Amino acid sequence: MDIKQSLITNNVWWKNQKINPQFLLGRKREEFNSIIQKIDEKRILSIIGPRRVGKSTLIYQTINYLIEDKKVDKKRILLFSGDDPSLFFNEDDKISDVLEVYFNEILEESISNLSSKVYIFIDEIHFIKNWQNYLKVCFDRKYNIKFIITGSSSLHLFKDSNESLLGRIENMYVLPLTFNQFLNFYMTYVTKQNDINLPKFNLDKPEESFKNLETIYYDEEMKIKIYKILNEYILVGGYPEYFEDRDIEIWQRRLADDIITRGIYKDILTMYNIKSPEILEKLMYYIADNNSQTFSYSSMAGNFGVDTVTLMSYVGYLKQAFLINVLENYSTNIGKIIRSNKKISILDNGIQNSLLKRTELTNNDTGHIIEAMVDFDIRLISEKENYNEYYYRNSNKEEIDIILDRKIDIIPIEVKYTNQIENSDTNTIKNFIDKNKENKLGKTKFGIIITKDIYKKEENLYYIPYWLFNL
């Protein structure tokens, strides 16, 4: 194994070659700006998200920014991958072996006495054994290095490393595109037009945010354009690679083969000794067919012929790999939360449709998918802001789709993807708001109902069409 030659081959900018435009794409995700803001902070930056969501593209875009905008010496930017067999052929190969060659033979500087900052990008770092120990040493010795690492799951980055990297690492989650992100990718790659800038709905300023939506809501030409794109998003989901060909049958095969099957058999199995990996795949199909439904671990375990502890572990692996989402039933009683049924959904609607081989959707399909999409939007903001997300079902079997616990307040969110909403349809959420105006865990000041095309306010309830709901 020739480490030096492998690094030279992969880091083409050292030889004054430009990064392949295919690696840069023509569109940057919102997360790119967040990376740039943190690029010179001391802490290790970890970019976490499922496979094929665009983490490697973000790395190349950041490297290009360092070269073109910050004018960083090209040899002070290093990229390698933890699943590169030319560098990590067996478990005994270490990060230190790679960096020793880099610093001694390429940069020709001592790691402990660097003349200026070095930027080291390590893609798919979870494939490298004991990676966290080496990065901890570099951080604690205050080497002039900025590490940017990626992993396909929070399991990968935090299994056995919570304690060693505490206070030394900052996490950034990169998940499938939200509808608003998809909308502007569509404008770039399909219509070749300027972005459609939907206002953000600021949960701290709901009244002001709601009024800001009015102009766009009454723009009929804009609405027709957005609805067309929304219908495509509902079917194909939020993985950026879709824009490479936009063929639904090819796309669904790619989702099933690459993101689901390889995500399970390569990513999850690299971390855990799973006796029956095929159950993980069957579990994904089961969840897709029962999307956004409540369940108990014991009953589901019975369906798969495994014990409850095993089933709970498998569900946890899929959640941490950002393939599914699991919600607890909201209660002020912790015991009730633990004992109650859970609500489960596929995180990306395109994956759900590919598993069920749906190339066309009924109105009933769309309603369930929109609920899961709102669930995804709320999980995304919860991951970023350290909020808690629940669903609600009381003893009378009255339900609310999502409860967002922001610690300072509690926001109930109900999905009614229709243009006919009766007063009886909103009784549960109204009663929840009244009951929780003075809650020991946080006040409930308002609620949100996600609709198809109803835009109005009734007392402390905001009715917002899904296509306008941009957090």
Image: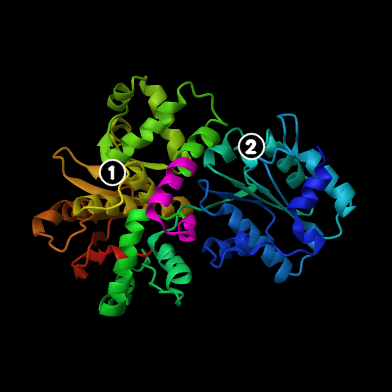
Report crowding for label 2: few under 14, some 14 to 19, many 20 or more residues within 10 A (C-alpha). Answer: some
- Residue 461 locus on image (x, y percent): 21, 63
User: Can residue 409 be seen?
Assistant: no
- Side of 339 relative to 32 (left or right): left
- Residue for badge 2: 127
Q: Amino acid at mark 1?
A: Ser
What segment carries the magenta color? 240-258
Q: Amino acid at mark 2?
A: Phe
Q: Is residue 177 above or below residue 337?
A: below
- Residue for badge 1: 292
Q: Is residue 419 above or below residue 313?
A: below
- Residue 96 locus on image (x, y percent): 79, 39
Foreground residue among 66 and 141: 66
Foreground residue among 335 and 56: 56
Q: Is residue 431 above or below residue 344?
A: below
- Side of 110 relative to 164 (left or right): right
Q: Quadrant of the C terminus?
A: bottom left
Q: Residue at x 37, y 36 (%)?
A: 284
